[in-house]
């Protein structure tokens, strides 16, 4: 681990932009911002994107900007309309001044040496991405929940090396999140990587960026604290009624993920990439079936069948070396009449306890 940095120059220690989207997070934003303001790595800018919430979150931000000794590091960019977390992150990619960009959600907080640990590895190996581990903590009690910790340090370099690591099989070998990753801004801009959709945008972004990575480091160091709260935008379980638009927005984002698979059809990991997309969408349909009775409007079988559209053609599937039967099963399901297809998915989902 690096020694704490007390003095630095931009040449030695490049500017890191820490991007924080803010929308109705008044109870949490102060703890989040303080964890960033108190970083041991000092050459940072804190880019707060105001997504026009209706509470006093931005008053908290502005008070810290004015009164905290490091408050001058905070720069605020305001949207003219509410655009969602994906567009807030796009604003960060466009507006950031740093050589590296680090996303943090406004209801979470980071360890005081988080940026220091990540940037040290990014500089040492000139990585496109530096990825560390995170813990989950319960809101209120602070109880540590199951932690997502990488088992060992890995330096992954070379054309398609990172993609082949991610696509070794159908397990997730990297967390399906975009926070707690130190991105090279040049990498993001050169590959025109942007967020899309208002639901499931992290999974889509991961699906877009991992294939372009030429150099990555993965670390077991825990640098990020993900706060698990029942009213989170990610949670369905705590609500008696779920707006139908949420699942439809997720299906829309997944449709973009499906369409973008074709760009990888000549890459060695295409078969597993498609299988991962199919598995991701199958899980989304299982979630929809599990919570179907609580949606604000009826979700039709036809809509769920559209979610199951396979990203590859039958001729491509027949050439796949890995997961061919898996692909053929879901490809066949996608061609069945909607009631029969969704009935089959229900049986499979119940059998594997996803429903």
Image (spheres, helix red, strand yellow):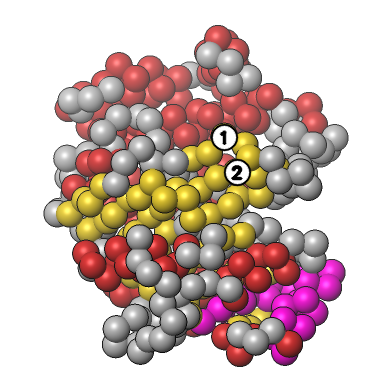
Residue 286 falls left or right of residue 17: right
Residue 15: x and y in percent read 40, 82
Cβ atoms at labels 1 and 2 below 8 Å apart: yes
**SS class of the residue under badge 1?**
strand
In front here: 56 or 134? 134
Residue 40: x and y in percent read 49, 73
What's the distance in space between the residues labelled 1 and 2, CA to CA?
6 Å
Residue 274: x and y in percent read 33, 36
In front here: 262 or 31? 31
Regarding residue 296, the answer to whether it shows in the image is: yes
Q: Quadrant of residue 170?
A: top left
Specify start and end residues of the magenta stretch as a single range: 45-66
**SS class of the residue under badge 2?**
strand
Label 1 Cα neighbours within 10 Å, binned few <14 / some 14-19 / many ≥20? few
Q: Earlier along the polypeptide chain: callout 1 or callout 2? A: 2
Instruction: Please report the residue visible at 61 percent of the width from the left and 67 percent of the height from the top.
Output: 35
In front here: 280 or 45? 45
Instruction: Please report the residue visible at 38 percent of the width from the left and 17 percent of the height from the top.
Output: 329
Magenta segment includes 166: no
Residue 273 falls left or right of residue 180: left
Residue 38: x and y in percent read 58, 73
Label 2: which residue?
A: 136
Label 1: which residue?
A: 146
Instruction: Please report the residue visible at 69 percent of the width from the left and 84 percent of the height from the top.
Output: 68
């Amino acid at each position: 681990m690096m020694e704490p940095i007390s003095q630095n120059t931009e040449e030695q220690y490049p500017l890191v932009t820490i991007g924080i989207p803010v929308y109705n997070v008044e109870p949490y934003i102060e703890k989040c911002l303080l964890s960033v303001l108190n970083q041991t790595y000092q050459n940072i800018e804190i880019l707060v994107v105001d997504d026009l919430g209706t509470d006093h979150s931005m008053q908290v931000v502005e008070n810290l900007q004015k009164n905290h000794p490091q408050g001058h590091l905070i720069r605020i960019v305001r949207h003219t309309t509410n655009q969602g977390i994906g567009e807030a992150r796009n604003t960060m990619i466009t507006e950031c001044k740093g050589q590296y960009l680090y996303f943090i959600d406004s209801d979470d907080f980071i360890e005081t040496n988080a940026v220091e640990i990540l940037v040290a590895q990014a500089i040492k190996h000139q990585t496109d991405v530096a990825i560390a581990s995170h813990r989950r903590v319960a809101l209120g009690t602070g109880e540590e929940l199951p932690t997502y910790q990488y088992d060992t340090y890995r330096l992954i370099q070379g054309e398609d090396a990172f993609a082949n690591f991610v696509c070794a099989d159908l397990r997730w070998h990297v967390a399906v999140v975009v926070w707690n990753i130190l991105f090279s801004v040049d990498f993001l801009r050169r590959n025109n990587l942007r967020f899309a959709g208002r639901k499931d945008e992290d999974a889509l972004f991961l699906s877009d960026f991992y294939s372009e990575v030429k150099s990555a480091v993965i670390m077991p160091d825990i640098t990020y604290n993900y706060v698990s709260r029942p009213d989170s935008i990610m949670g369905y379980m705590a609500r008696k009624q779920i707006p139908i638009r949420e699942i439809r927005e997720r299906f829309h984002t997944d449709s973009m993920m499906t369409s973008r698979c074709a760009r990888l059809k000549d890459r060695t990991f295409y078969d597993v990439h498609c299988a991962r997309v199919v598995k991701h969408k199958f899980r989304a349909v299982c979630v929809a079936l599990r919570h179907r009775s609580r949606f604000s409007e009826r979700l039709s079988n036809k809509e769920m069948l559209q979610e199951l559209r396979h990203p590859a053609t039958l001729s491509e599937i027949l050439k796949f070396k890995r997961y061919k039967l898996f692909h053929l099963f879901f490809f066949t399901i996608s061609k069945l009449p909607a009631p029969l297809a969704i009935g089959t998915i229900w049986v499979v989902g119940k059998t594997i306890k996803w429903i």
